[in-house]
Every structure is written in structure tokens, then in C-alpha cells.
Image (cartoon, rainbow, N blue to C red):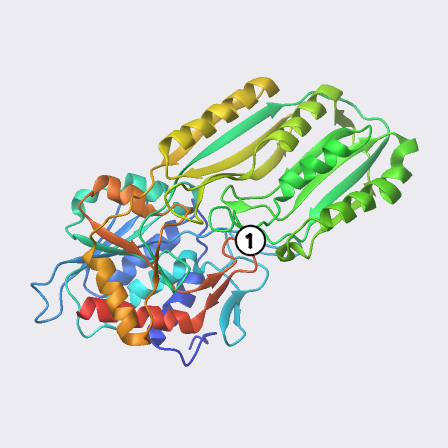
Amino acid sequence: MKKYVVTGRKPDREFRFFEDHNAIPRGSHNEKAVSDFLLAFAKQRGLEAYQDSANNVFVRMPATPGMEDRPTVLLQGHMDMVCEKNADVVHDFEKDGIDMYTDGKYLRARGTTLGGDDGIADAMMMAIMDGELEKHPTMEFLITTCEEVGLDGAKSFDYSRVTAKRMINLDSENEDQVTVGCAGGVRTDLVLPVRQVNFRGVALRLSVRGLAGGHSGENINSGRANANKLMGRILAAAPDFRLISIDGGSKDNAIPRECTAVIAVPAFLEQAFLTDFIPNEEAAIRGELFPDDAGFTLTAEPVTSPAKMWDKNSTLRVVSVLADVANGVLSMSRNVPGLVGYSRSLGVVRTEGDRVSLVFSARSATESQLDASEDELSALGALAGAEVSHYSRYPGWDFAENSPVRDAWLAAYKRLFGTEPKVTVIHAGLECGIISSHLPELDMISVGPDMKDIHSPDEALDLASCERIFRVLEAVLAD
């Protein structure tokens, strides 16, 4: 009999199914196995279930007796997860399930992302499919793929299958909030060709590590540093050197925590780099960082000399882009006090032979600002001699004045726990924007249990909050 990490929690099925779900590798673009698992799960319970060519899974479940005349409700989440790990952790996201543990309050993973975003939504839906609720209307469930890399599964789904007029998206991370609007976004790649020449001097590896990272939408206004941008700053200040390679971050929608640059310096400068420049830069940056980034380190160490290095012009072009490109919060919302309106994050820098790729994620609920981000990066790319491509653009989700499902959630939460959640609009992207563009009459909200540090190896899922969210969901569906 399988031994589960989480025990003694209600409903037990929610947590068991989450662990079963997390045993299957499910990074973006690697969801076929988990999609098959979810499809089989629904069919084994006699439910009408469909899997499309993008591996999205759609399920329909009849109402319980006496609830047949109630409006159909759609529950929605995504099956993929962001795959991030600490540098010293051995884990293959293509093959390995998540190694979990609990400290009593939180469920965590050992050195990797947990996948609570959004696996806990799938687990709640599975519990309902398995018969956890005594009363519910006709239910529809949509579990999508590739949400974390541009909402691609939601973009490709055939929404003519949906009959519901009310939807609860389960992809939020704050129990005390009901989300009723979100930003849109667009990805941009800048690919810079570099010219390699024969190596001379000595080779040093510079490493930025220990930053908090996090979600490039939810955490963009937290003051957390971007490792790629820090490396650009460090290199812009460095004395005579040539780049050999630079690599930082692994996901465009995560604030990068680490970045490594291998450089060539004249032999007579090696000692000054190691004993003066690097310690001074580390001290200066440390004095500016927010408490979340207290683990920051900047190190330099000699490495084996390669055969080639970049020429001066290639080094200058790449460093100039890294140092100069606008990153972080670009403007605040005009309509929602305290909400980020427009942001950009340099999520990935990767050296591949004689090319360097820089991957950006821009977010805004205002389409003209997404246009501006595309135009600005295209102009920067033209100056730097880069190939520029924009892709995975998706719309935002507008606030609705009237929302029965929002009112029902607020009332049920207050009835159960005595307080009323905040109604909010977020800067992160949600599939609600895609879905509402196809089904504009669909009344929807986004909710979810408390999670910390999603998209990073520090991700933590609050177990008691999961219990409370399921109780509210149960009350709303029964009412």
C-alpha cells in the first residue's frame, strides 16, 4: 500500500490525489503522461471525458439528485508545472516525480518546485470527480496544458464543448483573495550572433547565486533582484575582459535566481578581479538588496581555459543589452491602487554555440503597453544586431461589475470563517483571459489556497488553507 506524505487532512482524497498526480513528470510540453492519467481517472468513474490534440482534458459530471436544475459550473486549472531546481540538486524533471515532505504546516519539495501551482487544483477536481461532494450541480472540468509557457493549451481548446455559464478557476495563490481580473502578456526572444576568436589570457567563472527568484508577475514588485540583470551590471562595470559564455535562469516566467558568466581577462588583471573587483561589487550590491535576497553571493574562480572567446564587439553588444534593457516594474496601474500595470522580466539568458538568446516576459492589461514592449525590444534588437521574435501573446481579463459566482464565493467564505476575502485584480496572467475571449458571457472568478514562492524551489503549499478552500468550494457548489 502506498505511503502518503500528507495524512490526517480533510478531504483525504484531495491530498492523496495531489501526491498521485505529482508522481508523474509534468513540466510544460511534457504533459502527455499526466493527461492520460487524468483522462483514465475520469473514465474509470464513468464520466464523459475528452482529450484533445493538445492533451487538454475536459470532463462532464452529472448533477446529484435534486440539483439538476441548477446552473452548470465549470472548474478549471492546468496540469503543467514550472520545473526549477537548486543547482546542487540531482533531479530529472523529464523522468522523476516530485520528492515531497511536510513540516506540518506546509507541503514542500526537496530542492525543486513543488507543483502546487497548479496541481492542487487538479487534485480538488479529482476529489469531486471521485464523489467527495454530497451535493453539486452539473459539473464541467477543464484541465489544460502548457499554461506556464504562454497559456498554449487554453488557446487551442474547442470551447464549443463548454455549456457552463459560471466558472471557478483554481489557479490563484492567496486564500484571502478572489481574483476578478488579470494582465495579458507576450514573450520576446532576442538572439544575438557572436564572433569567436582565439582565446588569450586567463578564464574566470563569475557566479551570481542565492537570490529568492519567484513569479515574474506576482513577485515583480517585491524588490527581488534579477540575476541576469545583476550580471549585466557587474560586467558593465568590469575592466578589460571578453565573454566566453553567459547563462542564467531557465524559465521566462520566473525571476532568475542564478547567472553564470565565463570570461577571459588578461593575466595581469586576474588577481585584481579576484581580490578587489568582485568583493567590492558583491559588497555594493548586497547593500542594496531587499531582505528576500539575503542569500545573495557573487563569486569568481579560475577555470580551464577554452580554445575560443568572443571578440570585443560581440562582448560589448551582449553586455550592453543586459545592462541597458528595462526590467521590472515599468509603470503602475492607473485604475487599481497598488497594482503593477506594466512590467518586463529578463527570464533567461543562454549561450548556444555562436549565439546568445535572451528571453523576456512582458505583462500588462493594456494592449498598447504590450505593443510598446514589442516595439522597444525590436528597436533594441536592431541596435544590437539581434534577431527578434514576439510570440505567445495572450489577452488580459477585464473586471465585471456584476458576478453571481463572485458574490456566492464571498458569502460562503464569510459564513464559514467570519471574514470576507478581498476582491482583487492581479498582474500575473491567468487562463481566464483566454477563456473569456472565447466565452464572453461566462461569469468567472479565480481562487486558490495559500502558496509561497511559486516557480522557485522554495515553493510551499499551506495544507490548512487547502482544507478551507475545499470547504468553500463545497459550500458554493451545494448552494
* Quadrant where the N terminus is found in the figure: bottom left
Q: Against 124, is 394 above or below? A: above
- Of 355 and 347, which appears nearest the observer? 347
* Quadrant where the C terminus is found in the figure: bottom left
What residue do we see at 63% from left, 30% from top? 324
Q: Against 248, is 459 above or below? A: below
- Of 118 and 381, which appears nearest the observer? 381
Residue 352 shows in this picture: no
Tell me where residue 158 appears, x and y as whole percent.
Answer: 22, 42
Residue 241 shows in this picture: yes
Left or right: 205 with respect to 124?
A: right
Left or right: 177 with respect to 377?
A: left
Q: Against 11, is 246 above or below? A: above
- Of 346 and 91, which appears nearest the observer? 346
Image quadrant where residue 88 sits: bottom right
Tell me where residue 111 appears, x and y as whole percent.
Answer: 59, 60
Tell me where residue 244 appears, x and y as whole percent.
Answer: 73, 31
- Of 213 and 95, which appears nearest the observer? 213
Q: Which residue is mark 1?
A: 92
Left or right: 12 with respect to 291?
A: left
Q: Residues within 10 Å of mark 1 (few under 14, many from 20)?
A: few
What residue do we see at 51% from left, 77% from top? 104
Left or right: 131 with respect to 266?
A: left
Q: Against 101, is 279 above or below? A: above
SS of the residue at dot 1? loop
Query: Which amino acid is tagged 1?
Result: Asp
What residue do we see at 78% from left, 43% from top? 281
